[in-house]
Amino acid sequence: MSSDLSEADIIALVHENDAYPEQVWYTIAAFLFVVGCFQWGSRIHSKLARRRHYESDEETAATNDIQYRFSLRRIPLAIVNVYRVVTFRWTLEIGQSYTLNMAEVFVTVAYIALLLIYAFVNTTSVEGQKLDIIYWSNRIAMLASSQFPIVTALGTKNNLVSLVTGISYDRLNYIHRMMARTCFMLLWVHAAGEIVCFPSFQETLSEPWLRAGITAMVAFSILIIVSLRPVRSDIYEVFFYVHFLGVLIFLVGGYYHTKGAYGSYWIWPSFVFWALDRFIRVVRLVVFNHSYFGFKSGSGTMDATTEMLSADVVRLRLRRPAHFHWSPGQTAYLIMPSVSTLPFEAHPFTIASFDSSLLSTPQTEDQSGNDETQVLGSSAPFWKELVFLINVHGGFTKKLKEVADTKGIVKVFVDGPYGPSPDLGSYDTCVFVAGGSGISYTLPVFLSVIESVRKGKSSCKRVVFIWSIRGAGYVQWIEEALIKAIQLAPPSLTISIRIFDTGSLSKAQSMEENYSPSTPTEKNGIPEQVVTRKTSLTSSMLLSLRGVKMESGRSDLDGLLKEEVSIASGSMSVSVCGSQNISRAVRHALRFPVSGPSSILSGGPSVTLYVESFGYA
């Protein structure tokens, strides 16, 4: 290189290769700081708004026509709602299963533009050659290398970015993948530039530093392929193994490749972040599963029972450890050595149960304490145990289904909880939308709202629970929890439960089909007369309660949500967990004009949307 470049070129190259990656880091750090200020500021505002809400409750309730009065004082609120719609509800939809909101699109475009600008700016050599290939080819590699620490950090469960921004690791996972793919693109541009720039490239293939770089890129290429959504979702276990080994090979190879160019200081922090995350997770595993590690007597404390709730849903239950606490909507990683291919596989699932004594009564304890007489689908465990509703796909979940078919017991290590819990205490109206096992997310949050209102910690006046299911028998999963919640709700709280059966001809037929003697679960030993009696009793009791309605057919989410917005005042939250079609329908329903400036300025509710989608991270 020294024979092709003047000494001035070399000085400029070295300076820019050091300075530009640092400037990119300063830009990213400043952006994360701003995002963190908005996120934490929003949380603080939510806490303060809850307090102020109590003072205005009586005035708001006294005059229902306030929401139709035009007021310029609501301009800031209208701006906030426009920002929410444009940023998070306007989406780029790719196919039937992939959706990017405009915030993700903006971050993607801005990040790629930032790196490309720094890669090609000031690439004119001293001799006047513009876009000198030696300039940008070397610099682009240094820019990509400088991103490895943050890419690695974003891929871990315990990272500083989540702490600073207040954004959970699972929501940052898209940024992790996007940044990794951008760096992958830059590194291949670097490789192509080096091949073109140096005719003697093949002669240097015997050099260890070059072989290390080639090995790293091969591993990175394989890693990028298996991380694509179709591959990742269909064969998650393959992705899990390849990701672990591929990242290790890539980082080690990248370290030795950049060591000669004095760029390895960008690589080694990745090992530190990864090791720190693993250390924290191991500590959490030991703390939360200490009965397996000899710190407490009583083996089997974390043994889990399994059962099939439907043809494609497994319910896994394990005794709730006294020291293990979680918030509604959080997830946990489950390690089941006897089920998974490798003993250290960790799979994420939302905790479907509610960590509270709200629904726990002496009568309930007696009724559900005997597992021998536990009725299929009984929802009593939702307030007694750690409960997970697991959709069956392939690989790990398919093996778990085989265990559940025999109602087997598996040993489970729990790593968690992870993720944020939505703070809905300041909202006047809370709407929950779920599809199938999406209730794993919406049910605990729904119960927490009722508990908060009972304790005077929430000013919510109306709760709407919308659930789309494929058979009326699905109601058995959570009906006891719903009945208890309605019975314990204070008079000031209006509850509306809308259940839509999309998979059966009628409620009666569906109930009979799901609990007939021919079902596989009953063949495993549940008495027919007990199931039939329980089904008719609880279902009729739930449907007879005020505000509960069950219908056949698909739900008109657009009409339902617009109806709730039209009768709501103050602030309103909508929490959704389900398929991409359900999430898209909710986003579409809450765009303009429902959350537009004219609606807000005229006194309409300020709507906040929380989306928890299905799929692998």
Image: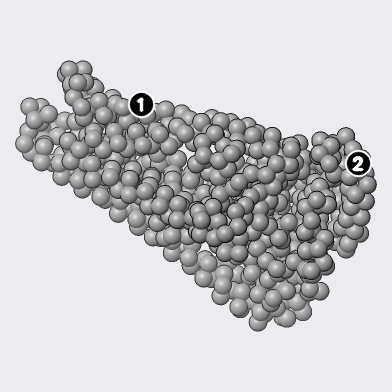
Task: Using residue 120 as the reference point, say whether residue 602 is left or right of it.
Answer: right
Task: Using residue 334 as the reference point, say whether residue 443 is left or right of it.
Answer: right
Residue beneath label 1, please? 218
**Amino acid type, residue under disc 2 in the picture:** Glu
For discs 1 and 2, the disc positioned in front in the rendered view: 2
What label sits on residue 422 in the rendered view?
Answer: none
Task: Using residue 68 as the reference point, say whether residue 224 is left or right of it.
Answer: left
Residue at disc 2, secondary structure: helix
**Amino acid type, residue under disc 1 in the picture:** Val
In the rendered image of this protein, does residue 498 appear above or below residue 580?
Answer: below
Residue positioned 65% across, 38% down in the render: 400
Q: Nearer the viewer, residue 555 or 128?
A: 555
Residue positioned 34% across, 55% down in the render: 29
Residue beneath label 2, please? 512
Residue positioned 60% across, 57% down in the render: 298
Residue at disc 1, secondary structure: helix
